[in-house]
Amino acid sequence: MGRAFVYVILGGGVAAGYAALEFSRRGISHGELCIISEESVVPYERPALSKGFLLPEAPARLPSFHTCVGANEERLTPKWYNEHGIELVLGTRVKSVDVRRKTLLTSTGETISYKILIIATGARALKLEEFGVNGSDAGNVCYLRNLADATRLVEVMQSCSGGNAVVIGGGYIGMECAASLVIHKLNVTMVFPEEHCMARLFTGKIASYYEDYYKSKGVKFIKGTVLSSLEKDSDGKVTAVVLRDGTKLITDMVVVGIGIRPNTSLFEGQLTLEKGGVKVNGRMQTSNSSVYAVGDVATFPVKLFGETRRLEHVDSARKSAKHAIAAIMAPDKTQDFNYLPFFYSRVFTLSWQFYGDNVGEVVHYGDFSGSTFGAYWVNKGHLVGSFLEGGTKEEYEAIAKATRLKPAIEDVAELERQGLGFAVSV
Ligand code: FAD
Ligand code: NDP
């Protein structure tokens, strides 16, 4: 016995919130849509967890950052879902899905059936154990994926103020959390395996700028190595991080940001998977025509690059979710998704944006000793990617537009000379 819905969204994160708004705009009846989420709160803007939520003064707290405020849209509170007749099954994990029978089984033992399923299960943080290091269960080892993690991180940071923190990983979580730890007056050491931070996106020159800035705030970098073990006291708290070369870092807390894995396990053997995600077409439809996938978990065709990608960023989650609902509700009027990849970050007083793809030859421009600089990526004679730190709204719009147009670049030296002016004049 169980309930039946026309539409079920599996997952209650960013993509789920934007999908719900799109459903309501396009017109659904009360009782047609259900959202099932392991989290106990309605969808919120996950990026807030590593930014406003961690601030020592006037921190952001729910309900202020429920979706869809991040895109300057309506803020969907529990009341909103209630008023729109959207059923919320919160704090409930889906244990299995049968796409042939169109049913889901929840952790409470309920079977929920659907006509159309939207997979929005996002991703989980990789644990140290997956790299052969034990210690994730220690009270002062923090990860950051959901509200519970963020709440714990704040408590641990506050209890360690003035002490030492080790950040494992030089990606997004590592960089954004390190900045917050500094603001909370901790002495921060970052440890990661690559030659420089944000290795998957930044060039060495761009990374140097941010590393120098972090160093000026007291952050130490230990690069090209990984941790090999954690030392604990009799209470089970980590007291030191031991690196592969034997270096021991005495610490009061550890923050781990070593990447994610998309939550695809419910669909293995049932749907086509690719590049770690659930493969979808330009309508965000999976290999089963009644099932759609959006957000971090979806591997979709990026028309601009002529290949499929799985992106782990909020703008992609928002727009892929909206697109899937458009394709479901107005199939004849909906073209294939034509997405321009967009990544960004904000730390201290710094702020950068990136559009497109970071492949090919790199052209840096601007003042790397000042506050505004950037880079272009040129591949096969065309501009394919643009990065800008410290831009204005109009300048960011200009690099986005230029990147989408993929203009031919005949003279790379001239592009370097024109710098930001090139994008502005395209
Ligand atoms: P999620 O938002 O992760 O939502 C997935 C949901 O599915 C969760 O509610 C989860 O509990 C639920 N779920 C999973 N499995 C099940 C199951 N079996 N049963 C029930 N529920 C389930 N991106 C940017 O572009 N800019 C940023 O500044 C930025 N900052 C970030 C900061 C942090 C701390 C984090 C963690 C991510 C950040 N991101 C950022 C990435 C961005 O938040 C993600 O790309 C986005 O949240 C993906 O949305 P999603 O809906 O696909 O997945
Ligand atoms: P990232 O993939 O950005 O970075 C992971 C980092 O950890 C990389 O530097 C990686 O190196 C390194 N690493 C991997 N294994 C180890 C190890 N054993 N020891 C030390 N370092 C290791 O993931 P994050 O965890 O930082 O972020 C998680 C998710 O959250 C991502 O999807 C990200 O997009 C999202 N996020 C996005 C933000 C934004 O867009 N502004 C902000 C915060 C989070 P290598 O590359 O060699 O594997």
Image: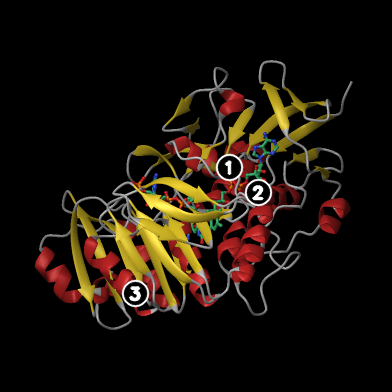
Comes first in the chain, label 3 or label 1: 1
Q: Is residue 164 left or right of residue 243?
A: right
Quarter of the figure with residue 37: top right
Circle 2 residue: 13
The answer to whether the residue bearing label 2 lies less than 8 angstroms from the nearest atom of ligand 1 is yes
Q: Residue at point 29% right, 57% down?
A: 223
SS of the residue under disc 2: loop
Give the amino acid type for the residue marked by disc 2 in the picture.
Gly
Report x, y in % for residue 124. Answer: 56, 42
Q: Residue at point 66% right, 74% down?
A: 59
Residue ranking furthest to the bottom: 370
The answer to whether the residue bearing label 1 lies less than 8 angstroms from the nearest atom of ligand 1 is yes
As drawn, the label of residue 215 is 3
Q: Residue at point 48% right, 62% down?
A: 251
Comes first in the chain, label 2 or label 1: 2
Along the line of sight, the residue nearer the viewer: 36 or 109: 109
